[in-house]
Amino acid sequence: MAIKKILIVDDSKTELMFMTDLLTKNGFAVKTAENAEDAFRRLAEEKPDLILMDVVMPGQNGFQLTRAITRDPLYADVPIIMCTSKNQETDRVWGMRQGAKDYITKPVDADDLMAKIKALG
């Protein structure tokens, strides 16, 4: 399945702008959400082909949200890449245990992110 539509979940406006800019320049359709509530609203509007998930957010964090999405039969097939400043190996392992397909640390390296997206596509 080719990845065309990407949902970015991040509470940082700077990060959202950077990622949206990067992804749209690479031909992706991008939607954004700033928290778990937003993310579920966006999912209900249109199912994305990929979710880029921040971890540290107010309310439900990215680990909890990833678990909730991957356990929902409607969205279980949507791959999630954790995209976070949490760079400890234990965080990466925990993220993968919650259902993430990959894990990338901030600041995001554009080439690295594109390679990870291509690997899923």
Image: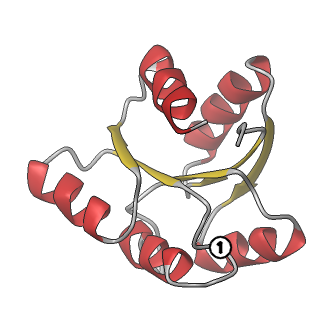
Mark 1 crowdedness (10 Å alpha carbons): few <14, some 14-19, many ≥20: some
Amino acid under label 1? Tyr
Please identify the quadrant where the N terminus is shown. Answer: top right
38 left or right, relative to 18 = right
Residue 39 in which image quadrant = bottom right
Q: Residue at x 72, y 37 (%)?
A: 2
Left or right: 2, with 120 as reference point: right
Percent position of residue 13, x then y: 63, 46
Q: Name the residue at the front extreme.
A: 1
Quadrant the C terminus occupies: top right
* Above-or-below relation of 98 to 107: below
Q: Residue at x 11, y 58 (%)?
A: 90
Q: Residue at x 59, y 38 (%)?
A: 14
The part of the image, by quadrant, that contains residue 94 is: bottom left
Tell which of 14 and 83 is nearer to you: 83
Viewer-proximal residue, 115 or 18? Answer: 115
Please provide percent x and percent y for residue 91. Answer: 19, 58
In this rendering, the answer to whether 65 lies above or below 28 is: below
Q: Secondary structure at mark 1?
A: loop
Q: Residue at x 40, y 79 (%)?
A: 64
Q: Position of residue 66 (x, y in %)?
A: 46, 70
Give the vertical position of 17 relative to 60 (above or below).
above
Q: Which residue is mark 1?
A: 75
Residue 65 on image: x %, y %: 48, 75
Does 37 sit left or right of 55 as displayed? right
In depth, the one of 89 and 117 nearer the eye is 117
Is residue 84 rendered to the left or right of residue 77? left
